[in-house]
Amino acid sequence: MSTILTSKCSPWTPIDVFLKHQKIHSKHNSKLSKNNIAASQNKIDIIKETLNNGIILSYDTILTFAENGYIDSVKYLLKVKKNDDDMMFSMNETLFNHACMSGNLQLIKFLVDNNCPQDESALIHIISNNHPIYVITWALDNFRFGLNWYLQYGNGCKLNGSNNIDIIIAAVGTGNLNTLKFLIEKGFVNTSDDNNITNLDLLPLKCACELPFRFGKPIIELLIEKKYKYDTSILYWRNDDSKEDILNRWALLFKLCKFDKKDFDYYKTKNKKWIETEMKNIFDEKWMVNVGFIDN
């Protein structure tokens, strides 16, 4: 029986899969000011004292509160004015995305109700941080860039902005099979053209192959069942992969995938030295013969 990740925190850093491909800003790669330790611990009294001393805070301060889901502190800071009577902190897409990172539905609802600007990546921040399905459901139903937008326009956004495949990649990166199944059932499905497969089309399975095998196995199986695209670019491993994971993953891939012969022959030619050295240190020679890496 496959293990399904249900806890909030992944046992690996999501930047290894989703973030490295899409380079989306997330709490996992945030570069917030070191002066915001108090904000990260929700010590609003320290922040109030700083404000009383006439110091103008950086925008990172409210982002830190939002990222951690501290709704009361965010509400307080949104009311703070500078000496010229302008608001110290305005509502914008960055604030909304940091609230989505937190998964605090009360905070997210508050910002939506107060017309905080949103962009296409808001939904991705909820999914990629592995928040519960009820939070994802609310976002799909209520975000400006929610389910209706993605299903109507998401298939066409290949170069700029987020698209349906980004949503799938975000779910894959969590290792949470339930979330991935839920999104596919909602309509986030593979729509790539067999005659025009892009690098983006290949990313869901490539990302799934970078997960620890106990999480990646059921996701790889589901994506192949749903006709997601692949080629020989999924045939690699990372330095921190265990030998057991490598053996299991490749055995699964060659069981489920039918690689194009021309593509596979090119792969063997291009990686001939690597196959004769690195691969032979990992795989049984009989298996390598059976799948076609070396001649009998």
Image: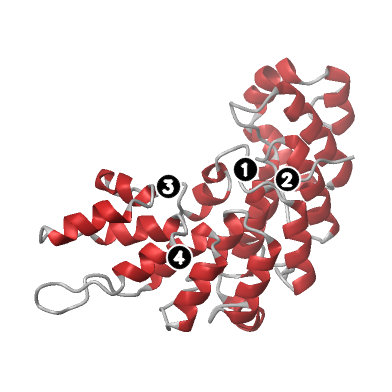
Specify few, some or many for label 1: CA neighbours under 10 Å numbering under 14, 14-19, or 20 or more.
some
Give how far apart the Cα atoms at labels 2 and 4 are: 24 Å
Q: Which amino acid does label 3 sit on?
A: Asn
Question: Label 2 belongs to which residue?
Answer: 5
- Is 1 above or below relative to 152? above
Query: What is the distance, in whole Å, between disc 2 and disc 3 at their CAs?
Result: 22 Å
Seen in the image, is 288 located left or right of residue 148?
right
Q: Do tag 4 and tag 3 residues touch (Cβ < 8 Å)?
A: no
Q: Residue at x 42, y 82 (%)?
A: 114
Is 35 placed left or right of 127 in the picture?
left
According to the picture, the residue beneath numbered tag 1 turns out to be: 10
Mark 4 to mark 3: distance in Å? Answer: 13 Å
Question: What SS does tag 4 mark?
Answer: helix
Q: Nearer the viewer, residue 17 or 214?
A: 214
Q: Image quarter for residue 60?
A: bottom left
Q: Which mark is residue 97?
A: 4
Specify which label sits upstream in the sequence, 2 or 3: 2
Q: Amino acid type of disc 1?
A: Ser
Circles 2, 1 touching at the beta carbon (< 8 Å): yes
Characterize the local packing of mark 4: few (<14), some (14-19) or many (20 or more) Cα atoms within 10 angstroms: many
In front of the other: 190 or 76: 76
Q: In which quarter of the image is residue 278?
A: top right
- Sequence-wise, which precedes: disc 1 or disc 4? 1
In three-dimensional space, the C-alpha distance between marks 1 and 3, rounded to whole angstroms, equals: 15 Å
Quick one: SS at disc 1?
loop
Q: Reading the chain from its start, which is encountered first: label 2 or label 1? A: 2
